[in-house]
Amino acid sequence: MSGTVLITGCGRGLGLEFAYQYARDGWHVHACCRDLVHAEDLLALEARFPEQIDLHTLDVTKDGQIKALDRVLGDATLDVLINNAGYYGPKGVTFGNLERELWRQVLETNTLSPLMLAQALYPRVAASKHKTIAFLSSKVGSIADNGSGGGYYYRSSKTALNQAVKSLSIDLEGAGIKVVALHPGWVQTDMGGPNALITVEESVSGLREVLADLQPAQSGTFLDYQGSAIPW
Ligand code: NDP
């Protein structure tokens, strides 16, 4: 299977690995990053696969940049749209020290922005062959899984994302688009930290397999990188 994929947050971590693996396997990759000038690894990847990778500047929180991206894409269709960019927010924040503006920034990045991007680009997905929109969520957004408390900003941003993903899966069913929330595992990235359990290679290989095998009946579900369902 190959096609065209658009990925957000490709400067490092899971986004960079998604861009690499899809390009390696012959896909056309629209790799988005908010600060291309300083994205050395992504620029090096593009130099390795110049025929397959198109780079785009995209801060997902900026509506003007979403519009500009849509214009630049011309008549391109997107088989897979991967909303990967994410932000944990400041670490170690506990109840008693919550700050409205910091919380708002995490919600902007993780909840509002992926939906605004999907809203702008979904006709391109509807016109494609594979018709898939994926959202990188997190198991810590699962209410059923929350046994330790804390993590207010990040947890709530992913929980709200999950609810939006569910609605979107219903709203886009008629267009034949499959919509899924994904948990990548606990992955060795800047966000996951050095103690994380799996590599980006392992996580992204698994997630790509999940996306390649995704059936219409699985639209509106929450799956991990091994294809197992996660309770909401
Ligand atoms: P990293 O922190 O390593 O990378 C985050 C990426 O998102 C960076 O490329 C960053 O860009 C980008 N980003 C952040 N804010 C914006 C923005 N406003 N506009 C555009 N890009 C932005 O995270 P991971 O690679 O680990 O995570 C990827 C996704 O997977 C996230 O959604 C995360 O929540 C999710 N996830 C990760 C887990 C893990 O263990 N790693 C576990 C569960 C979920 P820049 O370089 O410019 O800062």
Image: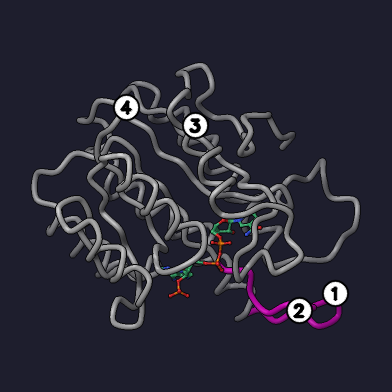
Q: Which residue carries the number 4 mark?
A: 1
Q: Is residue 176 above or below residue 71?
A: above
The answer to whether residue 76 is magenta is: no
Q: Which residue carries the number 3 mark?
A: 209
Q: Marks 1 and 3, how far apart in space? A: 39 Å
Q: Where does the C terminus fall, quadrant-wise?
A: top right
Q: Marks 2 and 1, how far apart in space? A: 6 Å
Disc 4, SS: loop
Question: Which is more N-terminal, label 3 or label 4?
Answer: 4
Disc 3, SS: helix
- Give amino acid for label 2: Leu
Q: Residues within 10 Å of mark 3 (few under 14, many from 20)?
A: few
The answer to whether residue 96 is magenta is: yes
Which of 229 and 60 lies nearest the eye of the viewer?
229
Q: Which residue carries the number 2 mark?
A: 98
- Give amino acid for label 4: Met
Q: Marks 4 and 1, how far apart in space? A: 47 Å
Q: Marks 4 and 3, how far apart in space? A: 10 Å
Q: Which residue carries the number 1 mark?
A: 95
Range of magenta residues: 87-100
